[in-house]
Amino acid sequence: MSLLHGILNVVYVIMQIFTGAIGVYQIAMSVFGIWHRKEKIIHEPRKRFAVVIPGHNEERVVGPLLDSLKSQDYPAELFDVHLIADNCTDHTADVGRNHGAIVHERTDKEKRGKGFAIESILERFKASQKPYDAIVMFDADNLVEPAFLRIMNDKLCRGHKVIQGYLGVKNPFDSWVSVSMAISYWFSNRMWQKARQNLQLSCSLGGTGLCIDYQLLQEMGWEATGLTEDLEFGVRCVERGVIPIWAHDAKVYDEKPTEILASCRQRLRWMQGHFHCAKHHMFPLLRQGLMERNLVKLDAGIYLFQPMRFLILFLTSIMMLLQVTTPKQTVVTHITHLLPTDFWVGVNLFLYLQMPLALLLERVNWRAYFGLAILPFFLWTWGPVTLQAYFTKANRNWSHTVHKRAIRLEHMRSR
């Protein structure tokens, strides 16, 4: 056997072990997402919230978000809405004022983007000594269910410090891209986030629908100005021993791109930020998790180890394809059968079946099931996106996602 074949065999062994272990791990964890019971709210409104909305040229979509916040089932005197018009060249600030928000116009061509905008408003709060109990963050294109703040108040009163709300999609049926993203989110919410909540592990922060205890934020500082500021802050919380929890019934809806190129650009930014965060935090978390026998830190490190949960499907599909198509009389035959073909077929079957199971458990609109037929094509696009992100992970420039549709909560409910 040549040296090249020997090297290829070793690489392939490592890929099989890594992919097989991650696939089985995800299947085992997702089982715990099947069970969900709506938690009863036992605490009356008490916490005072600062609702923070960073926005760049969001005049088309920020109005419906502000209106949905006005409709919160929570005393108006216990929350303020702060809109950060970050380097805007449109009428975002004017729309914010017209809808009752406290508007902060910010111009900084060097430090631009969501992370820096949040950092700036937190500095203002500290200087003014605002008497807030918690900070809640939304993206400008979001819509928020009326019970959101009441649920966050209850979680805070129970002693939790960092809480992530349910991440829904407000335009799931606009295109094959948006329905694929919606299915991915429904799956993630139930089989990833809810599963870890049931196991008392850390959820991953999604950047919007996020509630943080103000005192904790003052102690830690934000310090999350990368492309995935949510991931950075969540990892720092886990390292500190603070477990971010999942609030399945506190729902916020996000607009997703309808075109594949726009979706790839958005996911490229996510992945670049993921790789940057993993570079600084993955090995410390894995090491601490093993040394301290701390499953929360170990699981968080594993999440950073695999760039994206949906990349698992891409990798296991590749492995199954290689296993089935590799001729039996080759120099790598004994390697391709390190794990049998039935193993790869079974892993792929269980992983893909989680998608319709998640739709069933989440009771989504029947039209979503038609999206399952094209979902594998969308999931496979994670491969090239992740590969490009790895080689461009040094990029720190914020790429703005353009939002076009002013959807309202009442429109979503009438569909």
Image (spheres, rainbow, N blue to C red):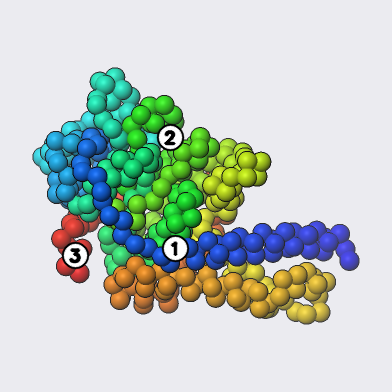
Query: Mark 2 and mark 1: span between their CA atoms?
Result: 32 Å
| Residue pointed to by mark 3 | 413
| Residue pointed to by mark 2 | 225
Residue lying at the far left of the rendered structure? 98
- Residue at horizontal 15 percent and vertical 60 percent from the top: 410
- Residue at horizontal 27 percent and vertical 60 percent from the top: 170
Mark 2 is on which residue type? Thr
Residue 397 appears in view: no
Query: Callout 3: helix, strand or loop?
Result: helix
Name the quarter where the C terminus is drawn.
Answer: bottom left
| Residue pointed to by mark 1 | 33
Residue 315 image offset from top left, x and y in percent: 60, 64
Question: Tag 3 or tag 1, which sits nearer the N-term?
Answer: 1
Density class for disc 2 (Cα within 10 Å; few <14, some 14-19, many ≥20) is many
- Where, by quadrant of the figure, is residue 393 drawn? top right
| For discs 1 and 3, the disc positioned in front in the rendered view | 1
Q: Give the numbered dot on residue 177.
A: none
Name the quarter where the N terminus is drawn.
Answer: bottom right
